[in-house]
Image (cartoon, rainbow, N blue to C red):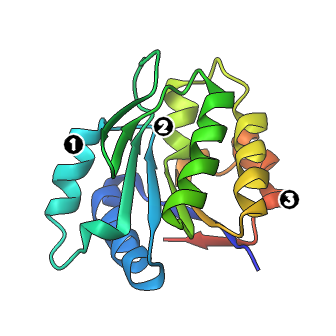
Amino acid sequence: MTMHTLFYVNKALYTETIRGLIKDAAHEYDKTCYISFNDPFNIVVRFFETIHGLDLDKFIIVDSSGKEVSKKSINMQTYVVPIHDVFRTYLFLRDIIREQNVQHIFIDSLSALIHRFSDMPLKRMISDLLLEVGQYKCDTSMVVFHEHLDHDIVQGLSPFIGKNVRL
């Protein structure tokens, strides 16, 4: 059964919390697609490299943090995908899930989406994404800061969330 989990994190402990969640994902899944709405891929890759013992082959990194206008492949495990092109993003994720046997999507973070892309229909976009990846039996983990706990977008996703974890 597919599980969508929402992790509420303390902003001050964000980096260490993400580090722990990434380690957990590496132990639990053979392949995780990490989607960054906050940092560009080069920062994410460097961060992953600092996690002792982490098998980087277990991760695909998707950078949706910027204003890119077209999808580009950095290598077989790192991609830049424009946030504004939602339909192509879904096709891209579907293909990644199928072709690379992704079992888990890690979304970092809902707070970055709320802060940086509030002009977009985020509630619909994320709920559509959860429905889409759920069809492929792919678990999802999402991170949000405690300060966004009562935000409309976070509350609107509650029907899709199987587990809420406060860290």
Q: Residue at x 37, y 77 (%)?
A: 26
User: Where is mark 3, residue-wise?
Assistant: 159
* Residue 5 left/right relative to 61: right
Crowd rating for badge 1 (residues with CA inside 10 Å; few <14, some 14–19, many 20+): few
Q: Earlier in the sequence, mark 3 or mark 2?
A: 2
Q: Residue at x 23, y 74 (%)?
A: 54
Choose between 55 and 11: the one closer to the eye: 55
Crowd rating for badge 2 (residues with CA inside 10 Å; few <14, some 14–19, many 20+): some
Name the residue type under label 1. Ile
Q: Is residue 8 in sight in this rendering?
A: yes
On-image quarter of the N terminus = bottom right
Crowd rating for badge 3 (residues with CA inside 10 Å; few <14, some 14–19, many 20+): few
Q: Earlier in the sequence, mark 1 or mark 3?
A: 1
Instruction: Tell which residue pokes out farthest to the bottom in this image.
Output: 27
Residue 135, percent from left and from top: 78, 61
Q: Between marks 1 and 3, how big is the CA–CA gap?
A: 33 Å
Name the residue type under label 3. Pro
Q: Residue at x 60, y 23 (%)?
A: 85
* Residue 98 left/right relative to 66: right
Residue 112, percent from left and from top: 48, 37
Q: Residue at x 26, y 66 (%)?
A: 56
Query: Hey, which quadrant is residue 139 in on the image?
Result: bottom right
> The residue tagged with tag 1: helix, strand or loop?
helix
User: Where is mark 1, residue-wise?
Assistant: 43
Q: Is residue 142 in sight in this rendering?
A: no
Q: Between marks 1 and 2, how big is the CA–CA gap?
A: 15 Å
User: Where is mark 2, residue-wise?
Assistant: 112
Query: Hey, which quadrant is residue 110 in on the image?
Result: top right
